[in-house]
């Protein structure tokens, strides 16, 4: 029997995946916040979130396969590769409330004005910096899309390339996070049965978002991209302060 919390997370997962398929970011942040909201412990939430988001981003990468910038995407993923294993053992010993506070501070930092240097950086250096940030921050807060967004919203990429390449990087990153969490001894326990339900929900959301994407212009995509960042940041900061 499906619990109320699981049904709620399934609905949130589908809607979050739809949003990510259109705007490229946002779904992971919504989902990890929802997992905390229904009472999951931080480490269980982080591991379950990594698995579900691996499916979500993987489905999105497949849907936009022809639009992936492989050279730059794989560069970013390679730079991010070792860092989760360095922080995983610290995470399992960290205080649960401290991790919740980190999530709030993480989003608060994203509300601050971005350095102008980000836009001035060549694409290769954007990927290198983004890789380091993803590897260090992603395992701690679960969702790193808000941090990566300024680096991937590159003027030389079409909206499909932005979504596709970010999805590739996120998929690889979540696989590495899962390996790091398991290596550190984290387990889903009684929540293992939640994974297939949430995985199916994000696949359905991705299919819906892929259909909607074709109706979104490049200019409107840029507006949605920025709006999603602002709304998600404000929502999570409010929840953290509350």
Image: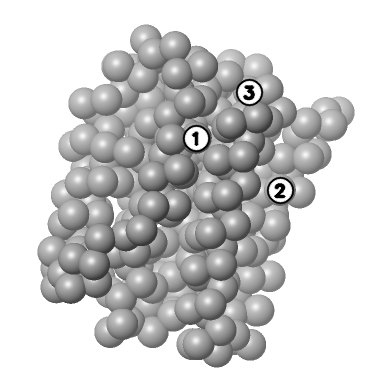
Quadrant containing the N terminus in the rendered view: top right
Residue 212, horizontal then vertical, whole percent: 65, 79
Asked if disc 3 and disc 1 are in contact, CB closer than 8 Å, the reply is: no
Residue at 45 percent of width and 18 percent of height: 98
Residue 187 or 91: which is nearer the viewer? 91
Mark seen at residue 40: 3
Above/below status of 87 relative to 22: above
| Residue holding disc 1 | 104
Circle nearer the viewer, 3 or 1: 1
Above/below status of 78 relative to 138: below
Position of 16 with respect to 225 (left or right) is: right
User: Based on the displayed image, in which of its 4 quarters is residue 15 positioned?
Assistant: bottom right
Residue at 72 percent of width and 40 percent of height: 9
Above/below status of 147 relative to 88: below
Label tally: 3
Query: Which mark sits nearer the N-terminus, 3 or 2?
Result: 2
| Residue 24 visible, this angle | yes
Q: Assign a secondary structure to mark 1.
A: helix
Residue at 36 percent of width and 19 percent of height: 91
Position of 54 with respect to 89 (left or right) is: right
| Residue holding disc 2 | 12
- Disc 1/disc 2 C-alpha distance (Å): 19 Å
Query: Which mark sits nearer the N-terminus, 3 or 1?
Result: 3
- Disc 3/disc 1 C-alpha distance (Å): 16 Å
Query: Which mark sits nearer the N-terminus, 1 or 2?
Result: 2
Q: Assign a secondary structure to mark 3.
A: loop
Quadrant containing the C terminus in the rendered view: top right
Residue 122 or 6: which is nearer the viewer? 122
User: Based on the displayed image, in which of its 4 quarters is residue 5 positioned?
Assistant: top right
Residue at 56 percent of width and 67 percent of height: 227
**Local crowd size for mark 2, using a 10 Å CA cut-off: few (<14), some (14–19), many (≥20):** many
């Amino acid at each position: 029997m499906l619990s109320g919390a699981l049904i709620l997370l399934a609905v949130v997962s589908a809607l979050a995946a739809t949003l990510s398929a259109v705007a490229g970011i946002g779904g992971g942040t919504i989902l990890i916040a929802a997992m905390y909201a229904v009472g999951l412990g931080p480490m269980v939430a982080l591991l379950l979130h990594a698995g579900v988001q691996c499916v979500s981003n993987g489905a999105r990468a497949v849907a936009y396969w022809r639009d992936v910038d492989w050279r730059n995407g794989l560069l970013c993923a390679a730079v991010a590769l070792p860092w989760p294993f360095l922080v995983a053992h610290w995470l399992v010993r960290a205080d649960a409330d401290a991790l919740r506070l980190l999530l709030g501070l993480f989003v608060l930092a994203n509300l601050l004005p971005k350095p102008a240097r980000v836009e001035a950086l060549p694409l290769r250096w954007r990927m290198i910096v983004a890789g380091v940030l993803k590897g260090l921050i992603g395992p701690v807060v679960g969702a790193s899309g808000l941090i990566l967004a300024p680096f991937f919203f590159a003027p030389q990429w079409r909206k499909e390339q932005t979504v596709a390449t970010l999805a590739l990087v996120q998929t690889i990153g979540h696989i590495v996070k899962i390996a790091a969490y398991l290596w550190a001894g984290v387990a889903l326990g009684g929540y293992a049965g939640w994974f297939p339900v949430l995985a199916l929900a994000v696949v359905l959301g991705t299919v819906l978002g892929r259909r909607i994407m074709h109706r979104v212009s490049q200019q409107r995509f840029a507006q949605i991209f920025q709006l999603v960042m602002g709304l998600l940041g404000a929502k999570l900061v409010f929840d953290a302060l509350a």
